[in-house]
């Protein structure tokens, strides 16, 4: 009997050995959605020149380093936030001395606004310091981009501002994979997105002096539909690929009258010393570049905005912002009231550097007083700090951050309109024109 | 502790195909003999064969004459991985089916008052090779690792009284490690993750010498007590090899990684824990012996893994990987039932708490607390003993998340690359190991 029992035991042991156990299949467990400070972990900025850090009529790393996304990135600790930094003299939208060159940014040369320099067109790509960055930039703001461009433009050729090579510099298509600004953002799996777009949909007409709704000004209904498309594509795209939706903070559209680029006619007349003649009647604003050509001859309509034109543009801005508020209610994103922020700046902040100099300030005093750069429509470093803090408030609200989690405000950045040089620079040919 | 700077090839180790897998907490392997394995390795107070050179060298004083034991223990570990994701991803992975041989060898001679012997064991090892290395998300930490550790322990035991013996020994350790991993790079406007480098690290440690101490006390014919201590070690690798090859497709990526491709010298250190085992056994019946052991592992000695590449002018290759293991106790229960003069039946159970913090869990070693169950039988005839045992080590399902987020060490939290690497291996792991143990022993 013992032999039988032992044999059975041996068989049992052998059977155990031959039928080796295997582990259960593990569960596919679900990660908690990014929320709170965790949602600060992967920040991507979308927009136009205001997002890109466009300053003094162009992109240059001096300005880009104080773009509002860069300042936000610093505040939230996003040390790997990569921008398409551009080396001196930058790439500007002014007219160069030669068609073979690209203009650099503007600077104050001690007596006038002039180009910091120019670059042969063939050498412009070499100015892009992070050209070999293997992934899309975290700051995807493209100067000149419209709402349509965010989800449609691949290169300068198919943007709404044909010839705008900033699309090529920043999106790096076609060699980089032919992805739009929005697609490049989605591919990064952002947990936090700031989006400030629509300014060029209305400014494109205003800065040309002849805004026409539906022609060079995007109607609010069209803007609303395109913006909703961006929000849907962003949320769906990130969710489909990564399984979460990003937190979204949106800047609304400032009034064109907040920028010193649009000089009230009365102020313009006081600067030139007499009631300046214009082709149009009932002129409300004169574009700042007109000061450079004010030789007494009547200003063409491209330099002036009539009261009716301003009213139309302002109605469009109100329409855009109403649409953003409605979409925010629907999709749950936060709107930052940049319209109110810029309108709330004091008079000196909303004045042009050159006018402040004319008012008796020193270069240093004027640089510290104004929030706008030499081109008159884009903020300077200080102005971008104002924008950054407005967005930071929106981020804190969107992510419901409190206590130690709150993202702190940034200190106001300083701006040097001389770019540290007394170089007279090249003359500005038809200054302050072009892309915004 | 003494370390020799001379790298010594241990021929015996390679002959035994010594690669193993973690069978106990961390990467310890507590199986050193077939009989012990059948008893859940609860033999500190009673070991009576060649495995005494590992379980309790003081046991030599209670063993007759000259004895020799050879044990081979094939091990087949299986690990499975289910990825964690925000949107219930469906990636499932598992390790390649493979078996390793754990050796156990002991020769002892008892002169009466003094006994001496030498043994070979493999108390630490790891063998984790993930299937489908081109897709396995944790490949950027490891897709194939082999770690083998050999202890050769000469010892002498002294019978202080007929009931008490004290012993001292020397654990001479040698280790071999091979680690294969990938380096990934997101690339292009679509941010695709591309494997750009394959990194193979291989090293042979210096010899390491540390003391071992044993005590066995049999105050009554039925009661037996035992204590065994193996000191902690720091295994030093001073002349390892690092080989980096490019996997990048031709173009900018290949150009970017080209400067990294090549051969490197590699040095590192690997901390091994002390092992302190305390056992108490009792002969409840002339045929039934039961023993309970508590084993303390000083795993806090394995707090980091520093990899130093040479050359590494930019510092991009060298790294310090925090591990921060914690000291843990194991509890082991074993039974030996003598059916007759020839046959004995063995059974055991062990509870083994994992020393590995969640932030260290991943592709390299997804450790978990375990329950071990064992059965065995021994047949003795004349001067010969034959033993066969089976143990199943069942790891608890464990994930490396905390509050729904991948666990990371505090010092890694501000390092995006380190956090990303942890995220790539976030998920739930399950594991089981099957151990068969065969022993043959003879008294001369």
Image (cartoon, coloured by chain):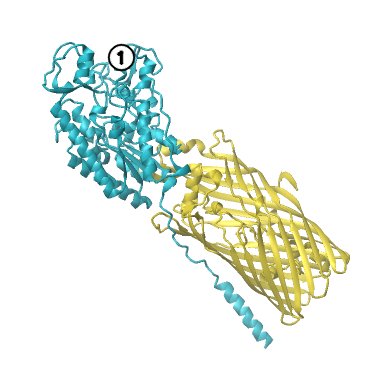
Chain colours: A cyan, B yellow
The image quarter containing residue B229 is: bottom right
Q: Quadrant of residue A206?
A: top left
The foreground one among A57 and A266 is: A266
Residue A417 appears anywhere in the view? no
Q: In this orientation, does residue B37 appear? A: yes
Residue A220: % across, % down: 19, 39
Q: Quadrant of residue B122?
A: bottom right
Pick whichever, B52 or B276, lies toward us: B276
Element at badge 1? loop
User: Does residue B37 appear to the left or right of B423 in the view shown?
Assistant: right
Percent position of residue B152, x then y: 74, 56
Left or right: where B276 falls relative to A410: right
Residue A161 image position (x, y, % from top left): 22, 31
**Residue carrying label 1:** A359
Percent of width and height locating residue B71: 69, 66
Instruction: Between residue A65 and residue B424, name the one nearer to us.
Output: A65
């Amino acid at each position: 009997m013992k032999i039988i029992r032992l044999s059975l035991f041996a068989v049992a042991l052998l059977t155990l050995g031959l039928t080796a156990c295997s582990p259960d299949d593990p569960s596919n467990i679900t990660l908690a959605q990014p929320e709170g400070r965790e949602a600060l972990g992967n920040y991507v900025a979308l927009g136009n020149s205001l997002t890109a850090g466009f300053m003094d009529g162009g992109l240059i790393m001096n300005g880009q380093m104080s773009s509002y996304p860069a300042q936000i990135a610093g505040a939230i600790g996003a040390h790997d936030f990569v921008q398409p930094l551009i080396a001196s003299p930058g790439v500007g939208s002014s007219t160069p001395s030669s068609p073979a060159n690209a203009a650099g940014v503007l600077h104050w040369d001690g007596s006038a606004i002039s180009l910091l320099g120019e670059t042969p067109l063939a050498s412009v790509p070499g100015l892009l310091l992070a050209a070999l960055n293997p992934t899309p930039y975290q700051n995807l703001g493209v100067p000149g981009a419209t709402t349509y461009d965010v989800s449609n433009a691949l290169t300068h050729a198919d943007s709404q501002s044909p010839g705008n090579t900033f699309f090529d510099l920043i999106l790096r298509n076609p060699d980089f994979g032919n992805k739009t600004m929005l697609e490049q953002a989605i591919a990064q799996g952002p947990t936090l997105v700031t989006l400030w777009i629509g300014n060029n949909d209305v400014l494109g007409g205003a800065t040309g002096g002849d805004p026409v709704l539906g022609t060079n000004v995007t109607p609010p209904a069209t803007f609303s539909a395109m913006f909703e498309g961006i929000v849907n594509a962003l949320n769906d795209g990130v969710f489909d690929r990564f399984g979460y939706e990003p937190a979204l903070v949106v800047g609304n559209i400032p009034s064109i009258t907040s920028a010193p680029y649009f000089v009230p006619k009365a102020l313009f007349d006081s600067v030139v010393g007499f009631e300046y003649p214009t082709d149009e009647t009932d002129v409300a604003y004169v574009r700042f570049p007109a000061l450079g050509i004010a030789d007494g001859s009547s200003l063409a309509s491209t330099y002036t905005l009539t009261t009716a034109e301003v009213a139309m543009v302002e109605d469009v801005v109100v329409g855009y912002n109403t649409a953003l508020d409605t979409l925010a209610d629907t999709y749950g994103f936060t709107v930052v009231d940049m319209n109110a922020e810029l309108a709330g700046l004091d008079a000196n902040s909303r004045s042009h550097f050159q006018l402040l100099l004319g008012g008796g300030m020193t270069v240093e005093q004027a640089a510290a007083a104004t929030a706008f750069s030499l081109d008159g429509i884009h903020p300077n470093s200080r102005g971008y700090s104002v924008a950054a803090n407005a967005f930071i408030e929106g981020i804190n609200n969107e992510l419901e951050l409190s206590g130690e989690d709150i993202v702190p405000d940034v200190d106001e950045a300083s701006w040097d309109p001389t770019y540290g040089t007394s170089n007279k620079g090249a003359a500005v040919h038809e200054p302050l024109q072009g892309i915004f | 502790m003494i370390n020799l700077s001379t790298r010594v090839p241990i021929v015996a180790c390679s002959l035994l195909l010594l690669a193993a897998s973690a069978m106990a907490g961390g990467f310890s392997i507590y199986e050193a003999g077939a009989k012990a394995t059948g008893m859940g390795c609860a033999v500190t107070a009673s070991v009576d064969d060649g495995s005494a050179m590992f379980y309790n060298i003081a046991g030599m004083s209670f063993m007759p004459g000259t004895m020799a034991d050879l044990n081979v223990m094939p091990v087949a570990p299986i690990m499975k991985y289910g990825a964690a994701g925000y949107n219930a991803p469906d990636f499932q992975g598992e390790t390649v089916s493979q078996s390793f041989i754990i050796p156990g060898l002991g020769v002892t001679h008892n002169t009466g008052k003094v006994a001496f012997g030498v043994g070979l064991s493999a108390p630490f090892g790891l063998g984790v090779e993930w299937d489908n290395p081109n897709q396995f998300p944790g490949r950027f930490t490891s897709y194939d690792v082999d770690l083998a550790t050999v202890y050769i322990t000469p010892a002498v035991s002294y019978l202080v009284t007929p009931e008490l013996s004290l012993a001292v020994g020397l654990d001479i350790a040698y280790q071999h490690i091979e680690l294969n991993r990938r380096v990934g790079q997101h690339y292009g406007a679509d941010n695709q993750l591309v494997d750009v480098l394959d990194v193979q690290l291989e090293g042979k440690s210096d010899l390491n010498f540390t003391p071992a101490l044993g005590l066995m006390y049999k105050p009554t014919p039925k009661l037996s007590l035992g204590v065994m201590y193996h000191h902690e070690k720091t295994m030093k690798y001073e002349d390892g090899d690092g080989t980096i090859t490019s996997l990048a497709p031709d173009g900018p990526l290949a150009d970017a990684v080209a400067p990294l491709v090549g051969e490197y010298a590699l040095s590192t250190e690997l901390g091994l824990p002390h092992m302190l085992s305390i056992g108490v056994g009792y002969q409840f019946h002339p045929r039934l012996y039961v023993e309970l052991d508590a084993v303390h592992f000083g795993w806090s000695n394995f707090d980091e893994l520093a990899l130093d590449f040479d050359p590494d002018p930019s510092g991009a290759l060298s790294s310090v990987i925090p591990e921060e293991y914690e000291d843990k106790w194991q509890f082991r229960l074993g039974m030996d039932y003598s059916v007759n003069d020839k046959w004995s039946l063995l059974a055991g159970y062990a509870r083994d708490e994992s020393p590995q913090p969640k932030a260290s869990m991943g592709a390299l070693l997804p450790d978990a607390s375990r329950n071990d169950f064992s059965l065995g039988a021994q047949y003795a005839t004349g001067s010969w003993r034959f033993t066969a045992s089976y143990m199943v080590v069942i790891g608890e399902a464990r994930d490396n998340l905390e509050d729904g987020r991948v666990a990371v060490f505090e010092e890694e939290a501000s390092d995006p690359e380190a956090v990303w690497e942890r995220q790539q291996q976030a998920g739930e792991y399950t594991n089981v190991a099957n151990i068969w143990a065969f022993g043959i022993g003879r008294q001369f």
